[in-house]
Each structure stands twice: as C-alpha cells, then as structure tokens.
Amino acid sequence: MHGCHGRRRDGAPHVQPPSRRVRRLWLLCGCATVLALTAAVPAQAAGTATPNDPYFVQHDQWPLSGQPASIDAPGAWTASTGAGVLIADIDSGADFNHPDLAGRLVTGGRFTRCDGTLQATDQPSVQDDVGHGTMTTGLMVANTNNGTGIASVAPDARALIIKVIDKSGQGCDADVSAAIGYAVSRGAKVVNISLGSDIPLATLLTGSSIPAAVRAAAQSGAVVALAAGNSSLPFSDYDSVTDVALVVGALGPDASVAPYSTGGGGVNVYAPGGDSGQSTTGPHAKGQVLSTALTNGGYTAEQGTSFAAPHVAGVLALLLSCGLDGPQARQRILATARGSAGGVPRLDAALAVHGAGHC
C-alpha cells in the first residue's frame, strides 16, 4: 500500500538489506495535518505534572495522557524529567531551527554513504531534510511547559542527532550499525531507532550488521529502542535482539494493537503509535501521534511504530535519570508493562518510574 508521494502507508524509514538501502518512510502522510506554531503563553516551573503546552492542554497528545493507551507521563514527571540523559536519535536528522526543539539538540554525525563511515559532525550535516527525525526527536525531548506546541516524554533530556537517512528517504544498515557505535562513544545511554526493512524479514533472511551493533551497545551499558515495523506480521526484523533491547509495537488510543503494527514474539513492549481509524477528543491529532514538523516550526500528526519507539526511549531516559543503568531500565519497563486491550504488554511510564526504587 502506498500513501502520498509513493511512500508506504505505515510509519518509519525501512532498511532493505539486499542492496543495503533504506527504501521508504513508514509515514501515513496522506492523513497528516501540518499545524502552525501555536502562540506562546507564560511558562511555569519545569517538572510540573500539568504542563501548559497548548497541544497537551487541548488533549491532542493522547499518547501522554487521557486515553487507555496513554503512558501516564504526568504521573512520571513528578519524579523524573530525564535530566542529565543523552538520547541518540538515529534517523533523518532533526530541525535545529524548530522553536520547540531549541536547546534540546546535540549535534552528532552523518552516516549516509552506505559504507559506515562518519562523513561530518557539523550541524548543517545533520539537519533534517525529510521530516521523520524531527518527529521522533520531538516526541522524546521537545521543550515542555514553555507555553508552546507540544510536551515530550523526557523534557529535560537531550537528543544526540545522528543522520543516516538522506534526502530521498534512503539509507543503509551499515550506516545504522556504525551510528549505533558512534552514539555510544558520544555518551548516549539510550538509542532510538525508528527504522526497519522495506521487505518484511529481509534483515533476517539476508543478514544484517544491526543486531550485532545493538548487542555491542547493550554490552557497553546502553539500551536501544527499535520500531518493530509496520508489516502486520507476527514477527519482526529485530526478533534476535529482544533479549537485550526493547522492540516496540504500536497501539491505537483504545490500547488495541494498531492494524499495521508488527507483533508477536519479536515485539516485547507496545506504546502509542496511532491509529487513524480511531477518534480522540483533541481537535488536531485524532487517533494519530502529534509531534514537531519540519515545515515552518509547525506540528504534524502521523501514525506508525516509528512513533511508538520514541515513547519507550523517553521513558528509558526518565529511568536512567533516576539512577538506573541501561539493563535495569529495560527490565523495569518490561516488569511494569500493563496488559493492553489486545493482551500485549503496554508501556506505563508512571509505574516504571515510581517502581524503580530510585526516584
């Protein structure tokens, strides 16, 4: 199935191992709504459980609060906001000019030659020219309680921006693997990868260097959150790393598994990814996930496991900020996951944070 501009109707860049190319973005772009920057209101103190960000106040951010699938971020924020934690977002870059990302981004590196080499480490080289990375980054670290736009899962964490997707929406698993190692070398303890194969199971059938890189990161004390994919199949390209990473499936607002989401034994936790077939009380997002957009400092609503994984990465940052290490944070999320409407383990930020014994 394809959405607008010939892109797949599901949700994050895909790695196709036979040619080592990431073919298309898993974005339901046909249903996206780009919103203008919301006017600011006076900011309050950081760390509040009731931030004044307009789209949060208007109930557009159902993944955080207000729906059966919500992660209960306000319940976690009273104890942790992710301060001191660096999250690596390995994606298409991010918009360093977006007002809601100001001060939240750290310049990383660019890996887009398909040979695993680091090309550049300057800000223009990791600027987003696709939009996908701006969305995933915003979900994790957008400025919160600043009277503008959206709230994020870990508002006092920062994101290390690593670009592995070029302007055509393509990339290679060799570059993703190298980027994981680079992220760890730069001090990232959490890594978000909202990327997968264009062909379901291609990574398993032909081999990939990504699982080995994920395991190496885990051995270094970091923890990786990976988007499970949008193939609707009962297995993921990342089945082989569920013992050391968090492979994330997508839920709609009612906590049922989204119809596009990969599931089964290769997925060990589920988080809000959106379902355009469901409605919510917010006037803009509806059943999709709202985040920062590349266009003119705005916001956009999309769906996909691409947007489920950053919610998990953000909660990992909350836990690390409490004093847990990567493996402990991973295990805590699994141990406190609630049963969803579909009987799968659902991310619960408040339970994870308050059950950690460190916050």
Image: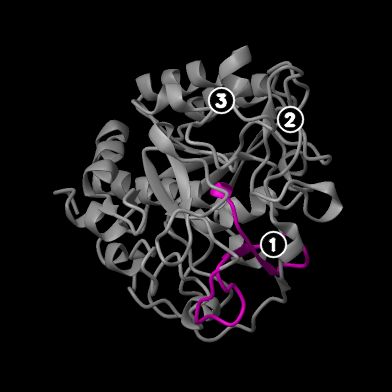
The segment highlighted magenta reads: 278-306
> Does the residue at mark 1 contact the one at mark 3 (Cβ under 8 Å)?
no
Question: Could you tell me how far apart the alpha carbons at marks 1 and 2 are, in whole angstroms?
Answer: 21 Å
* Front label number (1 vs 3): 1
Question: Front-most of 97 and 55?
Answer: 55
Magenta-drawn stretch contains 43 = no
Asked which secondary structure carries label 1, the reply is loop
Question: Front-most of 242 and 103?
Answer: 242
Q: Residues within 10 Å of mark 3 (few under 14, many from 20)?
A: some
Q: Is residue 246 visible?
A: no
Image point 71% across, 41% down: which residue? 126
56 sits to left or right of 333: right
Q: Which mark is residue 293?
A: 1
Badge 1 amino acid: Ala
Query: Residue 63: x and y, percent?
Result: 45, 64
Question: What is the quadrant of residue 221 in the picture?
Answer: top left
Badge 3 amino acid: Tyr
Image point 54% across, 55% down: which residue? 104
Choose the circle earlier in sequence order: 1 or 2.
2
Disc 2 target residue? 171
Q: Quadrant of the C terminus?
A: bottom left
Report the predominant secondary structure element of the magenta stretch. Answer: loop
Query: Residue 68: x and y, percent?
Result: 36, 68
Asked which secondary structure carries label 2, the reply is loop
Disc 3 target residue? 182
